[in-house]
Amino acid sequence: MNTEITDTLNKSKTNWVCYDAECPICLRWVNRFRGLLERHGFTLLPLQSHDVRAALRLSEPELMAEMRVITRNGDVLGGADALAYLSGVICKPLFWLTRFPGAMPLLRRAYQTVARNRGCAGNACQTRRASFFRVGNPVDWLPLLVLGISAAVIGTQLPAWLYMWTLAFALFAGCKWLCYRVALKRGVKPGLGKTASFLFGWIGMDAAAFFTKPAEKPQAREFVAAAFKIVLGTLLLWGATPRALAINPLLGGWTGMVGLILVLHFGFFHLFSLAWRAAGVDAPPLMRAPLLARSLGEFWGERWNTAFNKLVDQFLFRPLHRAVGIRAATMLVFLASGLVHDLILSVPARGGYGLPTLYFLLQGVGVLFEHTPFARRIGIRRGFGGWLFMFVVTAGPAFWLFHPPFIHNVMLPFLKWIGAT
């Protein structure tokens, strides 16, 4: 078939992108990216065209099941594989994300499920799940893509620890802008001062709540708790870390990292939350006593890093679960979390690739397992059994998340820079 395709379509040795010309959603995305694809040497052609039908020689249902890319060498790629191929030509960082273990099977399933549920009748797509494509628009997502790619490129010239912070800040800034834009489209109209406060003075991602929802005044004991965590983290960071480092570099790196997390995520970020809530603004703390979680789902969904939870719930889980179901959407969310952490942790460390993704996929499997009848029978969704399961699954493989290359190449140099070692 490759020879026939080459003879029929690729006499000029070009790449072809074949799409459903009777699908409004397909047409919208084709028109949006036509210029970019053509600049990279692709020619766009409808699946309904005589040449494509003659070359592929597929039945009508098979032909219209998914988009196709036909390369200048005559290779045919469909669906998620076609999108991955296009990302390899147009945007290398996106392509690298598809190479992580387990990424492509999940992407193929997601693509196939969305394609099957377009509600096509007579090849005219009346997409029933259009909400999946309405979460923002390309203009809203553009800062996230530009900042992320720019940080990934510029960071290669920086020290590894600065590369990590550059990537983290770029992704954070892009996500803040995206959340702000979506809030505006939903009718929220903040003033200039409130807008600046959300974009530059708060780490949370729930823009609508920050702009409109009042908050109860915090209690004094919360200020004491935040101060205690800062003091404890400081003692670990500048007191215990040098001693731990003298015993073992990995132990020193982990001690300093735990101290840093206590100072920033549990301490100062909590103080920011308290300050905003004291001013009447809804700004929940980033960490909500995660060690009190009585299940793995509660840990990740309600207590750990609430800013990231809000982000993935709004832009990934809610749209995806309508298209692919709750189980697949859950795994895709954890896959996305893993890929983001691989980008921020493994790429600057130049090692440990795939381990953070593996860690988060394990968390996803654990969350799904909690909802099985067997898990309910053995009591791991409540009480001490639930807490123990949560602790073992999150803490046990934590060295996959913060792997040795990250500790040696990123964390230890950063600890040295701040004078903790």
Image: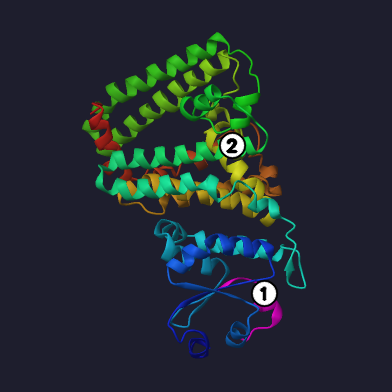
Which of the 4 quarters of the picture holds residue 120? bottom right
Q: Which one is in front, 174 or 324?
A: 174
Residue in the image at 54% along x and 34% along y: 307
> Label 1 sits on what residue type?
Met
Q: Locate residue 327, reporting x and y percent.
A: 65, 52
Residue identifier under label 2: 310
* Circle 2/circle 1 CB separation < 8 Å: no
Q: Is residue 65 magenta?
A: yes
Q: Residue at x 42, y 66 (%)?
A: 89
The answer to which image quadrant residue 112 occupies is bottom right
State how far apart marks 2 and 1 are (Cα). 36 Å
Name the quarter where the C terminus is drawn.
top left
Secondary element type, mark 2: helix
Q: Which residues are magenta?
A: 57-68
What residue is pinned by disc 1?
64
Mark before the other along the chain sequence, 2 or 1? 1
- In the depicted structure, whether residue 60 falls above or below residue 165: below
